[in-house]
Image (cartoon, rainbow, N blue to C red):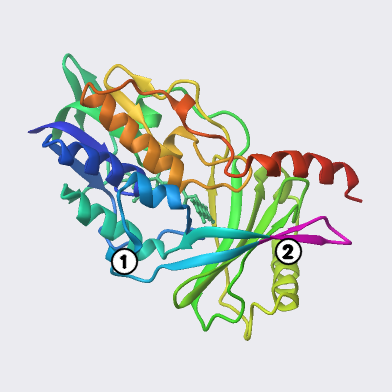
Amino acid sequence: MRYVETIIVGGGPGGSSCAWELRRQGRECLVLDRKEMPRLKLCAGWVTRKVLKDLAITPSEYPHGLIKLKRFKLIFGRGRRFAATVKSSQYSIRRVEFDAWLLKRSGVETVTHTVRQVTPDDDGYIIDDAYRCRFLVGAGGTNCPVKKALFEPDQGDLIVTQEVEFEAPIRNSSCILWFPFAEPWGYAWYVPKANAINIGFGGRRARLEKWDRARLWDDLLALLRKEECLTESPPQPKGYSYYMGRRRKQAKKGTAYLIGDAAGLATVDLAEGIGPAVESGILAARDILGKGSYSLRAISRFTLPFLKRAVLRIATLAP
Ligand SMILES: Cc1cc2nc3c(=O)[nH]c(=O)nc-3n(C[C@H](O)[C@H](O)[C@H](O)COP(=O)(O)OP(=O)(O)OC[C@H]3O[C@@H](n4cnc5c(N)ncnc54)[C@H](O)[C@@H]3O)c2cc1C
């Protein structure tokens, strides 16, 4: 059995950020991920400046496609939609490139391994009778095996999404968010990338399951054409689910941590999950290093605090 001081399950932005901080301080760690990088990850790929700042990344050093989203258009309401365009200084990336690059940049060793069993022992944890560690970081997303083995089950509704990313010329360079879209709190988006477009919609499973998703997809395509975002029909979307805004009360137990989506950290307004995954990964690493204590309080629940107020007002106006 192989012993490593810290094992991180999952090499997404949460896991690689935790590894980056530990490796910077010269500490031993290992990432186990069920998929080999680069791997497909359904995600709009919109990242804030804070993400780059937290990871000390300058846009010019990023070797793949990264564009600055200078305008962010929020389209509110249902029948009579009204819009507000705000200046933006956010970025868009493709997750297939970004996640693999972050992991490589962290300098951590990564093993392709699907974690199935996690067992506490006297001085840490045993994984699949193959690995032992003192510190264990659960960064495996919504279905993280560390969460399932050591923490309370998730509560509440899942967010389900339909999404597709495809290579296409960019006709509209604004990032667009429709809110609400399918149900009182559902949303839809358009994110232009360096050489691709990402579109999709999401909402609470309990509500969306009752809707005709094919019709919703057609509704979204009509909205996209109205905004001159599409020149041709995009490929069929794929589904994905995750917990949004369902932050856990307990994200540290003994020397085990939950970070990113495993801890339900995506923001409640824009479902921004990359930033909270990065922040929580760095915070967990600092706790392991003895340089801070792991608390989710420091991580904001909202990307845009003003949106919460606007949404509450619009929800009462919607027909
Ligand atoms: C449709 C959609 C659009 C989104 N758009 C945005 C956006 O534009 N901006 C934004 O900030 N956020 C967005 N999010 C949220 C964002 O994708 C997530 O919050 C973010 O990926 C969380 O990072 P993570 O590192 O916690 O988990 P993940 O990125 O999910 O990484 C988890 C890793 O764990 C691995 N893993 C899982 N199970 C196991 C196992 N048993 N053994 C070993 N490895 C395992 C997986 O292979 C994966 O590599 C979006 C989400 C969805 C669904």
The circle on residue 60 is 1
**Is 244 on the left-hand or right-hand side of 53?**
right
Residue drawn 44% across the image and 21% down it = 250
User: Which sits in the foreground, 300 or 114?
Assistant: 300
User: Which sits in the foreground, 28 or 24?
Assistant: 24
Q: How many marks?
A: 2
- Disc 1 residue type? Ser
Task: Confirm whether the magenta stretch covers residue 79.
Answer: yes
Q: Position of residue 108 (x, y in %)?
A: 16, 47
Residue drawn 60% across the image and 81% down it = 171
Q: Using the image, determine if residue 286 lies above or below residue 194.
A: above
Q: Quadrant of the N terminus?
A: top left
Q: Position of residue 205 (x, y in %)?
A: 65, 45
Query: What is the quadrant of residue 63 in the picture?
Result: bottom left
Q: CA distance from mark 1 to mark 2?
A: 38 Å
Instruction: Check disc 2 and report its element: helix, strand or loop.
Output: helix
Instruction: Check disc 1 and report its element: helix, strand or loop.
Output: helix
Task: Confirm whether the magenta stretch covers residue 141.
Answer: no
Residue drawn 37% across the image and 52% down it = 52
Q: Would you say residue 128 is visible in this rendering?
A: no
**Is 282 on the left-hand or right-hand side of 245?**
left
The circle on residue 115 is none
- Disc 2 residue type? Leu
Which stretch appears magenta?
A: 73-85
Q: Which residue is tagged 2?
A: 216
Q: Position of residue 266 (x, y in %)?
A: 52, 41
**Is 86 on the left-hand or right-hand side of 19?**
right
Query: What is the quadrant of residue 98 in the picture?
Result: bottom left
Q: Position of residue 97 (x, y in %)?
A: 33, 65
Tag 2 or tag 1, which sits nearer the N-term?
Answer: 1
Which label lies toward us, 1 or 2? 1
Crowd class of label 1 (few under 14; some 14 to 19; many from 20; radius 10 Å): few
